[in-house]
């Protein structure tokens, strides 16, 4: 599995996508201005406290790459979404990754109350993310069942070595 270090943190590719849409068009990486839809599970690194789980809720989060405000998610517009959006720019359609987002690109010195928990000051965030759509283009394969998506919540939390 590929592990890369970035300015915002570390990315481990758990499942490599091929970047192809449902029409076999190569969509590739999202770029500034693209609207992506993801599923994710986020936790505070130090405590394991869950912050958000869209796999469990069975919902997508829409994020505009490069935007200061990202709709559909209870995140600080300049912090965690900044690290998450920067990570998404390096992914291709179909990628599933485990992200370790540094506090400077998460909630910083202020911390934040999220949907399911609170992030303390200067806390790093762990995010499991699946890039599902770019500008409405989705993967060619059939959507996975609820059970398959729910099971993804258990992959690789402690494998960022």
Image (cartoon, helix red, strand yellow):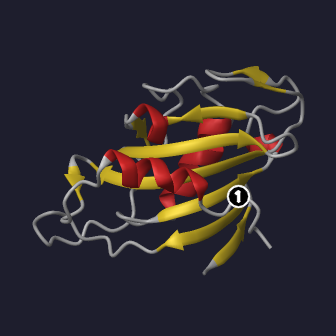
Given residues 39 and 137, the one toward you in this image is 39
Q: Is residue 118 left or right of residue 134?
A: right
Categorize mark 1 by other alpha carbons within 10 Å: few (<14), some (14-19), many (20+): some
Q: Is residue 82 left or right of residue 117?
A: left
Q: Is residue 19 left or right of residue 151?
A: left
Quadrant containing the N terminus is bottom right
Residue depicted at 42% across the width and 46% down the height = 38
Q: Is residue 70 above or below residue 94?
A: above
Q: Is residue 141 above or below residue 119?
A: below
Say which quarter of the image contains residue 115: top right
Given residues 57 and 76, the one toward you in this image is 57
Quick one: SS at disc 1?
Answer: loop
Kindly give the residue lying farthest to the bottom in the view shown. Answer: 1
Quadrant containing the C terminus is bottom right
Given residues 118 and 153, the one toward you in this image is 153
Total residue callouts = 1
Find residue 103 and report its horizontal and vertical position in percent: 81, 42
Residue depicted at 24% across the width and 54% down the height = 143
Find residue 96 and report its horizontal and vertical position in percent: 48, 63
Kindly give the residue lying farthest to the left in the view shown. Answer: 23
Kindly give the residue lying farthest to the front in the view shown. Answer: 147
Residue depicted at 38% across the width and 55% down the height = 148
Q: Is residue 104 left or right of residue 73?
A: right
Q: Is residue 41 above or below residue 109?
A: below
Say which quarter of the image contains residue 110: top right
Residue depicted at 38% across the width and 36% down the height = 58
In the picture of the structure, the residue carrying the numbered disc 1 is: 157
Find residue 158 and report its horizontal and vertical position in percent: 76, 62
Q: Is residue 42 above or below residue 98?
A: above
Given residues 116 and 28, the one toward you in this image is 116
Find residue 46 and report its horizontal and vertical position in percent: 88, 44
């Amino acid at each position: 599995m590929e592990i890369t270090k970035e300015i915002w943190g570390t990315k481990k590719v758990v499942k490599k996508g091929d970047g192809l849409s449902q029409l076999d068009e190569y969509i590739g990486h999202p770029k500034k201005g693209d609207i992506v839809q993801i599923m994710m599970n986020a936790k505070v690194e130090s405590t394991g406290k869950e912050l958000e789980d869209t796999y469990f809720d069975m919902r997508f989060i829409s994020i505009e790459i490069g935007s200061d405000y990202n709709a559909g998610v209870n995140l600080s517009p300049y912090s965690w979404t900044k690290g998450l959006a920067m990570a998404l720019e390096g992914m291709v359609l179909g990628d599933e990754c485990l992200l370790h987002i540094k506090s400077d690109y998460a909630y910083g010195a202020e911390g934040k109350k999220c949907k399911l928990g609170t992030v303390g000051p200067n806390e790093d965030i762990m995010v499991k993310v699946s890039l599902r759509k770019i500008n409405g283009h989705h993967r060619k394969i059939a959507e996975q069942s609820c059970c398959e998506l729910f099971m993804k919540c258990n992959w690789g939390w402690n494998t960022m070595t």
